[in-house]
Amino acid sequence: MEVDVWYQKLWEANRSTLVGLRDEEIEQARDLFCVDFDNRGTGFGGRVTASQEDAARWRAATQAVVAAVQSVHDRDWAARNVLFPPQRFWKRQAWRVRRERLQQEYQVQRAALVGELRAAYRAYRAAAGDLTDHVAAWRERWAREQREREARWRAERLAAVQEGVEGAVWAYRIRDYADRQQIMIWLPALERSDDGEPAGTRGGLTARQVQDVIDDERARDPYVWIEWKDPTGEAMREWHVDLTGAKAGREAAAWATITGVTVEPIVWRPGELEKLRSSRSSGGYGPSSNYWSPSGSFGTSF
């Protein structure tokens, strides 16, 4: 049976170490992964699955090394305290007489503590060093699977747009948005939702039929805005880049390739853009709390 194991860097669990210690072997051990008992998933950590036996072994090894390092740290701190001069004058005088001997004694103690620390980390590496290899393999597998998923999703997006070149697979909806009308366009194949299509949706149309709607609406109001929902827009940009070899794609350029008609998605009323810029420069936010900049994207939520 497999269980979840939260992990982190060993130095994240053991932040304290001997002051001034520079030891390559110990630092390499501190860079290994250990079990994160707080399940934080922060820093350098995350979560993997492993057998119950491996998980129990890693947890026990982590508990042992954390306890050992803390013990070494506490004893080192206590031993170093004798190197600081006392507050009282008469004690400070006696301390100066013994200072050299105290420093020699501390160095002997410190050498023993370093040896104990090294042994604790060596024991951890022997008992749980494979957790680091397990994490590396897990991350590599996840990255590979993610690349495969993204490749499949991209292929699905491109296929959906390609079908939309001739197929009756488009949908649109006209809505009031930011004191104007907006025609929202999408490919339902890329916009799956458990809530169903929003009210007013017309689907099963070719791109040319949707363009006819755009032409009719703009004949009545030339300031109607056109937008493609995000997943559909992303797919159209990718499709157009693949088709033309352009460095970057635009929904309007892809739409022109599909329909043969070039449309300007955003058409400003006379003086409207200047008014918006003025309101922005004076600290306002335009006529709507979710207004957008002329060069930015705009919302697609229904």
Image (tube, grey):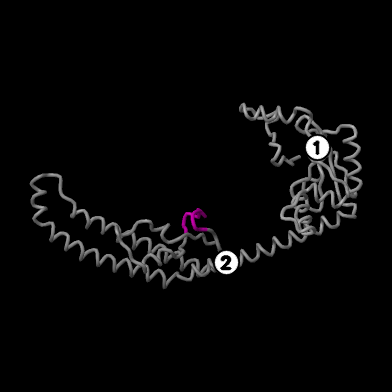
How packed is label 2: few (under 14 Cα within 10 Å), some, or many (20 or more)? some
Question: x, y percentage for residue 270?
Answer: 78, 28
Question: x, y percentage for residue 217?
Answer: 88, 36
Does the segment drawn in magenta span residue 40?
yes
Q: CA distance from mark 1 to mark 2?
A: 47 Å
Q: Secondary structure at mark 1?
A: strand
Q: Amino acid at mark 2?
A: Trp
Q: Which residue is mark 2?
A: 138
Question: x, y percentage for residue 112?
Answer: 25, 67
Numbered badge on residue 225: 1
Question: x, y percentage for residue 59?
Answer: 45, 64
22 displayed left or right of 98: right
* Residue at the far bottom in the pictured view: 126
Magenta extent: 36-45
Who is closer to the viewer here, 192 or 221?
Answer: 221
In which quadrant will I find the C terminus? Answer: top right
Q: Secondary structure at mark 2?
A: helix
In which quadrant will I find the N terminus? Answer: bottom right
